[in-house]
Amino acid sequence: MVEEIVGVFNVRQLMLEEYGTPRSCTLFLTNERVVVMVPEGIALRMVALPIIALVAGFIGFLTRNPILFFTGMGVGVGSGIVLGMLDFLIRHRKVRKVKQLPPAEILRVGKQNFEIPFSKTTRVQLRWFEELQKGSFLLPTLPKYNYEVEFVVENGKYVFIIDSDMLNQFTKKLRPFIPEIVEIKKE
């Protein structure tokens, strides 16, 4: 049987070793496994440029040098915005390119990409939770419900956050390969 991609879902992975910090990733659901692609953006050392410029601006503030202060702050904020947009564009382009590759190639594209084989998956749990959102002063916020999808495998577990509007499509595509999906209401 040839491995084919049956669904692509943009989710956030909970980093359990980093106290539940989420990072964005893309799940490629195939007929044999789930391939997880973590898009890599610009190098972390590029963030040093805005930080150095902001430190120079702060030194200009302490020494009461307005030219150094405004130059440092301007370069720091401007380069921070440019680097943020550049990182977003690079990640978006990589995800778009990878969606056209076969599953085996997706694993080789990035160092952080990994797979969850169905043969080693013992259980899939769904837990819904209410995501806290910032509201405005005048308007009340409506609750937003998301789901945690937890893949329990032989050597650990992987937890992903999926939007409630994508959940039905995700479970519909996953059920033929893992028939028992446990849904738990999270309090």
Image: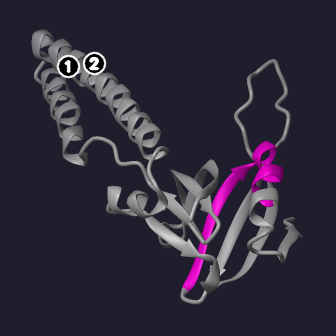
Find the magenta span and give its range.
156-171
Residue 114 % position (x, y): 45, 68
Q: Amino acid at mark 1?
A: Val
| Label 2 sits on residue | 78
Residue 35 % position (x, y): 52, 63
Note whether residue 110 is visible: no
Q: On screen, 7 above or below 34?
A: above
Asked if the magenta segment contains residue 165, the reply would be yes
Q: Is residue 105 left or right of residue 134?
A: left
Residue 75 % position (x, y): 20, 19
* Front residue of this view, candidates 99 and 54: 99
Residue drawn at the location 61% of the way across and 62% of the way down: 30
Q: Quadrant of residue 159?
A: bottom right
| Label 1 sits on residue | 75
Q: On screen, 138 above or below 149?
A: above
What is the secondary structure assignment of the residue under circle 1?
helix
What is the secondary structure assignment of the residue under circle 2?
helix
Residue drawn at the location 20% of the way across and 39% of the way down: 46
* Front residue of this view, candidates 179 and 148: 179
**Distance (Cα) linking label 2 and label 1:** 5 Å
Question: In the picture, which quadrant includes the N terminus?
Answer: bottom right
